[in-house]
Amino acid sequence: MAVNTDAMPGGGTGNDLTRREFLNYAWLASLGVLTLEMVGVAYLFALPRLAPGEFGGLVELGNVDDLPGVGAPPEPNNKAKLWWVQTEAGALALYKVCTHLGCIYDWKPVDVKFICPCHGSQFDPNGTFILGPAPRSLDRFVIIAYDAAGTEVARTNAAGDPLAIPPGSRVVVDTGAKIKGAAHA
């Protein structure tokens, strides 16, 4: 028995696509391409982009002798998002974000303390809580000191205590290693 190919949709042979089938395949192919592009973009977005010296990684502050010393007001470092503070006990790198609701606090030289403009939390020069709604003292970053040969000579301990840095040392702050401030009663 012979098959009448003229009676089949699309005319001719049985392998021809109908217009509807072609549009369905084209729609599915474009949807697949779009899905792959979105997965690719999401993957690239999720990759960390930490160039040397950027926040979230190691940020070099320079020679300790060139940084503000004991008795000098805290110095902001916007690149590393920290305040550099030298106390009698040693150096601190205080995270610039208030522990209450994440506002950026500022140093008030007249009051000799850090004050958050949003809700009035106050902290002494070493970041210890004084007054306000903040639940804890300011967070700190780990400071690492290297000698001229590149050997580590000092590092902030796990409690975030002030670090005594030997003169002539190169100072690096690990902004990826944040130490939470102590909670107050």
Image (cartoon, grey):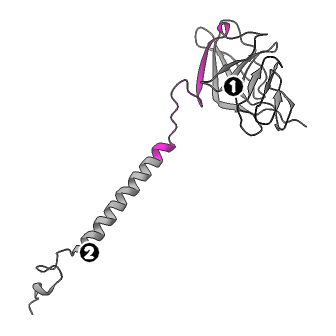
| Magenta span of residues | 43-66
Q: Secondary structure at mark 2?
A: helix
Q: Is residue 1 above or below residue 107?
A: below
As drawn, which residue projects farthest toward the left? Answer: 2
Give the residue pinned by disc 1.
142
Name the spot of residue 74 as percent of width and height, x first. 73, 17
Q: Residue at x 40, y 57 (%)?
A: 35
Which mark is in front, 1 or 2?
A: 2
| Mark 1: amino acid | Val
State the CA–CA distance, disc 1 to disc 2: 64 Å
- Which residue lies at the image location 79% right of the left edge and 36% below the top edge? 119
Across and down, in percent, residue 120 comes to 81, 33
Location of mark 2 (residue): 20
Sequence-wise, the earlier of marks 1 and 2 is 2
Q: In the rendering, which numbered label is found on residue 123?
A: none
Which quarter shows the N terminus?
A: bottom left
Instruction: Report the amino acid beneath label 2.
Output: Arg
Please provide percent x and percent y for residue 117.
76, 31
